[in-house]
Amino acid sequence: MAIPWWRIRRRPATERRWTKPEVTYESEVYSPYMRDAVRNGMPPIDTHSDEFGYYEDQNIGGGGHVYFKTATMLYNLKYVLGDSLFWHGMQHYFRQWKFCHPYDEDMRNSFTQATHADLTWFFDAWISTDKTIDYAVKGVKHNSRKGDQRIIFRRNGMQMPIDFQVLARDGKTYDFHIPNTWFTKPTSATVLPRWIGWDDLQREYTAHVDIPSGIADVRIDTSGMLADRNALNNSLNAPIDIGFDHHIRNAADRHNYEGFVRPDAWFNGYDGIKVGAHFNGSYLRQKHKVQASVWINTGFGQSLPEGGVDTQHDAISFNLRYENATDFILRGSSFNVRARQLDGLHLYGGGLRWQLPGRATVLSLDAKYMLRADSTDLTYLLYPEQWEPEQWNGIATAQLWDRFDHRGGSMTVALKARSSAVGSGSHFGQISLTAVEEKKLGQLQLRVRLFGQYADGAMPRESALYLAGASPEEMMDDKYVRSIGFVPYDWLGYGAEVNHFQHGGGLNLRGYAGYLAPELVGEENELLFTYVGNSGWAVNGELDVDGLFPIRPRATRRWLHIDAYLFGDVGSITYLNTNNNQLLTDPRADAGAGFCFTIKRWWRFSDVRPLTIRFDMPLLLSRLPAAEEDYFSFRYLVAVGRTF
């Protein structure tokens, strides 16, 4: 019943990858309905088809709910009427309107005639409003008494009759039904007094029950038909399902909070082999999202720059993050808190995120504090001299991000303002603008990045602007480069020559990776190194040419994608003169060709993130390092991830 026709048996034979069997009405009806209901994004379904775009622009579900919400409504009508009366009403409706074109009011009238029940309240709420269902068990009073226990319920959405079951301490179960109108469906459950209420009228209800041995649990709707947007509060004991994390994505379970646990191992050159466990959990992948990892750092297999063994590494590492959608306060909003002690870095922070109406615009506020407690924590870093230890670095960030689609491509724009937070060891302010344009040019794909930043104050080295790539702070977000162990040591450091490692970020002048970029400034030709600064600008471009000659070997096309492109970068960074004024250096530029190798699938593990290895050849430099003689020469660098 009520399965959208185009979704019937749509899944291919690869269903065998899924570890859980699926109930059709759950995967094809309730799942797409709950995806929007849980975030307060349900449109009225008596909306003309060409007007659903308005709701989509308000971060609300679109025209698909003509099917999903309508199908869910029919299951809930069955819940209201009971099986026999519902099917009697369906048969009457079919006989009355076969070979005709009925409207929603015709269906309403047909069911009213067949059931002799006033269902106006039901059809009005489901068809003409954006209301959803949310009933909760608030608690039990006088549970120690032998009888006359009081169960308190609360309604936060549309009204519905309530079926609930009481599990007694002696193992017995008792079924109850609370009507919400004068109509009571045929039921074997004990019928309690009516709960008449809607919107803010009588949001709470107290059920008086007699359970001789006492109440162990109360569960709303054991049939699973009620489309309650939050099943976590439908019982005294929150329904939690903990299982093994197979790295295979299953459909979310609307009846339980799902948690997944797996053993976890990682490595860096200082901690050696790290062994521990990882937990991730959420409700419908939108509420109460938790990511938690804990490792014991064994020290086995250390790979230090000078060789040998160093036992001063951290004994334990952890990484924790909690995120929750707050759509019922502000549609499209969420908040997060996080803490970690990982690879020598203590980080604590939190933030707010709001996806504005229109779907494309995102406003975020964030604050974080970082600390490397002593010099031993610098041993973890690829560039230990570029981080200031024993000093809190507190940063408050506000960012506005937007996306603009146009014919043949799209543009994303990010405006970011950052400043030092209260208690920070440094005091600075920073504002930056990043715009990325992507456009199809026949078989070619053009990507252009425009970047500009102005900053003032005592910028910590780890958060400064770097000429060739990402700052150490940015590198902390990538597990492959946040610490030593994966990048060869002779590719690192800054000197008179370029080296072979770069990580996307900063001005992204990749051809100058590892170069100190010396400049003679002022009347006295003072020598300054301009590989790092406060402010600057850059233009980066990549032209993907693999569309002209796709590189798709049969043996690897399912799991490996190869990009080939030409690139060019130009930009300038500031330095401080003797009067502490910021001045721009003469521009530097590079150009060349590159390849990206992306492992897009890891066998059957559907939720493991793709990994991109980049190989760039900056063949041309506009300003030569002192140790080189040819502007056009073979140079190469290796990186994790695209440049931008």
Image (cartoon, rainbow, N blue to C red):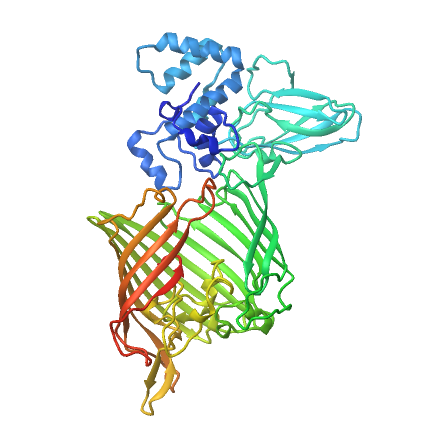
Residue 61, image x and y in percent? 39, 36
State the quadrant of the N terminus: top left
Q: Nearer the viewer, residue 349 or 248?
A: 248
Residue 70, image x and y in percent? 41, 24
The residue sitting at the bottom extreme is 524
**Up/down of 435 relative to 54, above or below:** below
Residue 73 in sight = yes
Number of on-image labels: 0
Q: Say whether residue 456 is left or right of residue 283.
A: left
Q: Which of 178 and 592 is in front in this view?
A: 592
The residue sitting at the left extreme is 442
Q: Tell me the residue at 36%/60% (across/down).
A: 415
Residue 56, image x and y in percent? 36, 39
Q: Quadrant of residue 94?
A: top left
Residue 601, image x and y in percent? 42, 44
Residue 131 in sight = no
**Up/down of 643 relative to 461, above or below:** above
Q: In which quarter of the image is residue 612?
A: bottom left
**Up/down of 604 relative to 443, above or below:** above
Q: Say whether residue 149 is left or right of residue 390.
A: right
Q: Which of 175 and 589 is in front in this view?
A: 589
State the quadrant of the C terminus: bottom left
